Image (spheres, rainbow, N blue to C red):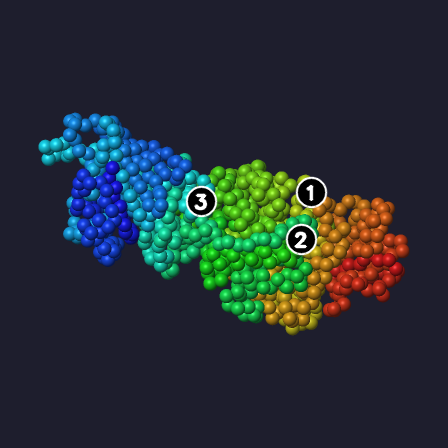
Amino acid sequence: MATFSLPFTIQSHFINCGATKSPKLIDTSHRVYGQRVAHSLEKMAAERSLNHGEVTKYATKDSFRNHIMKVYATSGVSVVQTEQRSSIYLFRTEVGGHVKVFVGKKNLKYSVHVEVSSLPLSGSENKVVMSWGIFKSDSSHFMPLNFENSTPDSRSKTVETPFARKSLDSLAAQLDFEASMVPFYLSFLLKSHPDGDSRSLVIRSHRNASFCVPVGLGSGLPAPLGLSFAADGSMNFALFSQSAEGVVLCLYDDTKVDQPALQIDLDPYLNKSGDIWHASMDNALPFVSYGYQCKGGIHDKGNKLQTEHILLDPYAKIIGNANPGVLPKILGKLIKKPTFDWSGDVHPCTPMEKLVVYRVNVARFTKHKSSKLPNDIAGTFSGIAEKLHHFKDLGVNAVLLEPVFPFDEEKGPYFPFHFFSATNLYGPSGDPAATINSMKEMVKTLHANGIEVLLEVVYTHTAKGVALREIDNSSYYFGGEDEGLGARDALNCNYPIVQQMILDSLCHWVTEFHVDGFCFINAPLLLKGFHGEYLSRPPLVEAIAFDPLLAKAKIIADSWDPHDMVSEEIPFPHWKRWAEINTKFCDDVRKFLRGENLISALATRLCGSGDVFSNGRGPAFSFNFIARNFGVPLVDLVSFSSTELASQLSWNCGEEGPTNKSVVLKTRLKQIRNFLFILFVSLGVPVLNMGDECGQSSGGSPSYGDRKPLDWNALSTGFGIQTTKFISFLSSLRMRRSDLLQKRNFLGEDNIEWHGIDQSPPKWEDPSSRFLAMTLKVDKDGSDSSSELSALKGGDLFVAFNAADHSERVILPPPPAEMAWVRLVDTALPFPGFFSEDGDPALEQEEAGYEMKSHSCVLLEARRA
């Protein structure tokens, strides 16, 4: 049995696969091995005078660029994986008989054992040899083994290793290789040399091709998708592509070079199961990143196009830029996820009805120099954790992060190109591993302070030029231009493989990053079927609702479409799991405070939007907002109302833009207080927007791109101080009066009473009515515990809203027995008296009533005298 040992490490260089029918091989040694089959490393070195310097000299990319080796990779081979991680390949020859190849690893060496049996050869004196060579990616370039007397352009025979007879009809040979050389392919032919005949018979496989087996490269497994690591350190690659005719795994040893160091053509017979292409590799060194090439993966009006692009693995967990420049490559990293100590981390698991949410953009939150954070922390996940005190000052218990997926930097975070990693822009120095741990540290820090982390996610479309297009356009994307979806790079969310990718992504963020929930941007597109039609029971939405790993995660549908910057209202199937961003709340409150709409619309929003959430859910599923990250911010909502902003339902309070008029400024200040007050006294989840607490302005522009980083100095202004304190007061009020203001279920008839100005019923159908009042009544079940609780928290609440431009004298309802009304809020009073936790004990009911100023809101609480 022949043993051939290769003691040196060889750098691989090659070109893409260009296999043809020619059986000729390029010479790799200039030496035919004789009958002696055992060769030691020392003897090889002595006989060949081979030294590492010679190998380094010739083993360059340019040395063998023009060497064309035309040998066909064998397909249709049976493969058996053994428990010792060895592989067995079974071939049939073109003349009959069988070739069995065993590839195994032991003590940092790979052995290839070849057995030939039942080979029908005439004559008893036939000598059979194995003519072989090794190559890295395809049969275009063999790796050099010996350069003695050779030149880069030399062509001659391959290495020939004789077989030893194992039995009457069986021959065997063995080759050994250093582990540092893998992965590579061994390609060989059989040659029979009859005694006394100068001619030789070349024997190929039954497909008239060379025998070819991978060494250090296994067929791999189709699951899980992406890059995964086994306990022994070996790696498995798996990629879905239904339309690709071929897939090339591209490995880089330097992220600064244009071309990969190694390209491995995946054999559709060995490396494909269904529509999943897969491979395994024992040794990653010296490779640091990877990507794919898909052949025939693009379909344009029925025409298949070829691509030379190196494509990002959609399931890569750690990604980074390679070859920075005009068109930087994005590649997956060949590293395990960094370790992180989650010990002691506990999800707050805050009930939805008790949430107070703060929407924040990671970069803009601390990027401004006024944050006084170091440059490597400002604008990052770590910056969020550093400003923890701001969330606590406001009284919020959940942050809603704008999308953190890698995105098109020109179009913004709502146009992602990857779903399993956080953008390196939000990490220290752009390091992907450090970014991962910094986000995890942020989550852990917020959890330790009782604050949940929710993510806005975009799964309905991608940025242009994303790898998914070239991997499998017809599976991942809508193709119908008629619906306008194809031009929007809209993902076919309910197609099985896309649905699975979205579910896998969500579970990844829950298990790896411990996030507490997701807000799905452009959620109506999640409801569309293969042809753009709306589905009554969309598989993806239902699967998310019932996925066990997402059982404790909050899932919220947001109808906002980043393409049109509008919200599409559509009944959303929920299975009593899906909450929704309530656009109707925003619109109706804005209309009321600018003197429009029926007061019944406001009443519906105050009570939790029963027209939307009464079918098996409740007010806790309504995420209410006044202003958000698109459209005008809160201060602009009361400062601009030009015709271009008609859709914003804003009102400038008497003068457009900045002004010095005290009357206008007072009205604007009252309106801002009114918006915040209504947001917090309404049933549902209040959602604050970053910067509204300090009057951050976009100059009247509704464009998302015109939003500026948060100016922390603005929090120290008079407006910033009083608004921040008012929000904190309202948050505390909701918590203290959770019996009336934080309800998972709708209020009963006994818990609410509506009033007009003089205690008469409200003028529900009068479009000119601008006043509405309500009394929220505590449950009176007669139990001692309930009485004690009421005494501790307070009694009934009286809430009144006056959107008219004149004062109203309101007749108050009688307070409960042995109680009196105290004023907690009057938005028309000057700071600091317009709100008080203790209440105003001097307030007493008078027959003349309580005077409410124009554009104001009032909150009274019944307390024991």
| Badge nearest the viewer, 1 or 3 | 3
> What is the crowding at mark 3: few (fewer than 14 residues within 10 Å), some, or many (at least 20)?
few
Judging by the rendered image, the residue that carries numbered circle 1 is 614
Residue 850 in percent (x, y) is at 83, 61
Question: Which residue sits at x=53%, y=68%?
Answer: 374
Judging by the rendered image, the residue that carries numbered circle 3 is 230
Horizontal placement of 232 versus 257: left or right? right
Q: Amino acid at mark 2?
A: Leu
Q: Secondary structure at mark 1?
A: loop
> What is the crowding at mark 1: few (fewer than 14 residues within 10 Å), some, or many (at least 20)?
some
Q: Is residue 95 above or below residue 499?
A: above
Horizontal placement of 592 versus 200: left or right? right
Residue 286 in percent (x, y) is at 35, 53
Residue 644 in percent (x, y) is at 56, 59
Judging by the rendered image, the residue that carries numbered circle 2 is 355
Q: Is residue 725 above or below residue 515?
A: below
Q: Is residue 706 visible?
A: no
